[in-house]
Amino acid sequence: MTRVVTLAHYYTAPEIQQMADKVGDSLELSLFARDADADIIVFAGVRFMAETAKILNPNATVILPDAGSTCSLVTQTDVSALKAWRESYPDHVHVSYINSSAEHKALSDWIVTSRNVDDIIAHLYAEGKKVIFSPDYNMGGYLNYQHGYDMPLWSAVCEVHDKFNQAALDEAFAACTTAKYLIAHPESPLPVLKLADYVGSTSGMLNWIKSYDKEPDGVIFVATEDGILYNMRLARPDLNIEQAPIYAGCQCNSCPYMKMNTINAVKNAQAGKGTVIDYLTPADMDAARLPIERMLEFSK
Ligand code: 13P
Ligand code: SF4
């Protein structure tokens, strides 16, 4: 019998999460994919996540439900320009966010996720290394600001998180009559991150919500993709959780690529139909696996 394992990122719609064997952030899903005893892995997420699953579990058939599920951090990065940029810093370590193509990963020394980026870069600086960071300009800019690093940065952004906006938040805060808090994903712009009570990964924000013990009637604004609000409200139905505004009066902040994982597309993928990640050569996968494994070893 064909063993099918379905993975869903927290940013997919609730009905897609309910179809999955495992729901998680990108680090959790990478680990689950690596260890999955499966003939077929259906990855209800975006393409770079499905590629990472294939790199870590090359014997499985990995299927992306919709071929269009990309990520702006990938589409805004021209790999030949990235190669030239990387070569212009020959004495630097190249740290890349997992939101990158397999070719991009192959040009990297370390891969990080939003969960371990702080610790890995602190470790490299502690060893006296010089670091360049790609592709997320906001995430790298926040690390430079917070820790006084001097990392040269690549200039792509997440088109969803980059829309969060300080003026809109100021307005939403001013309208609040109770205590207010902001938690934010580090892909958001620096002026927004500077306002946050907590900056962290998808799972980090979920844990912050789970252990919330501040003002019971406080409003918690969440600056990240809207899918995770489902998990937050499920974990703490007693809390007042709101999506942070992207501009005054507008609170829609949904990743169009994650939402391409419709019920039909996932059902088809579970039946073996969809975009099979079969275009990476063994040499490409070996080159991309090295920096990913370095991260997984570090995060054990
Ligand atoms: P996580 O690493 O927190 O799962 O985030 C992935 C992502 O695409 C954020 O926009
Ligand atoms: Fe990419 Fe942003 Fe969508 Fe995450 S939310 S997959 S970073 S476009």
Image (cartoon, grey):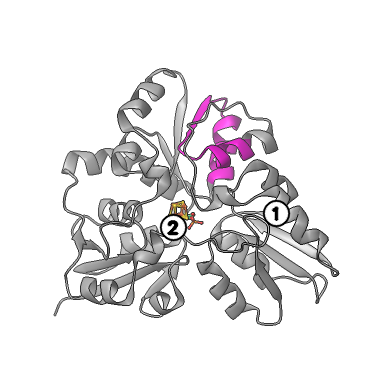
Residue highlighted by disc 2:
26
Please state if 222 lies on the left or on the right of 213 as rendered: left
Gap between marks 2 and 1, in whole Å?
29 Å
Q: Give the magenta-colored segment's residue range.
A: 117-143
Is the stretch drawn in magenta largely helix, strand or loop?
Answer: helix
Circle 2 SS class: helix
Q: Is residue 86 visible?
A: yes
Residue highlighted by disc 1:
168
Q: Nearer the viewer, residue 125 or 230?
A: 230
Q: Nearer the viewer, residue 161 or 238?
A: 161
| Residue type indicated by callout 2 | Ser
Q: Quadrant of residue 91?
A: top left
Please state if 252 lies on the left or on the right of 39 as rendered: right
Circle 1 SS class: helix
Q: Nearer the viewer, residue 170 or 35?
A: 170
| Numbered-mark total | 2
Please state if 199 lies on the left or on the right of 9 as rendered: right
**Outermost residue, front side:** 249
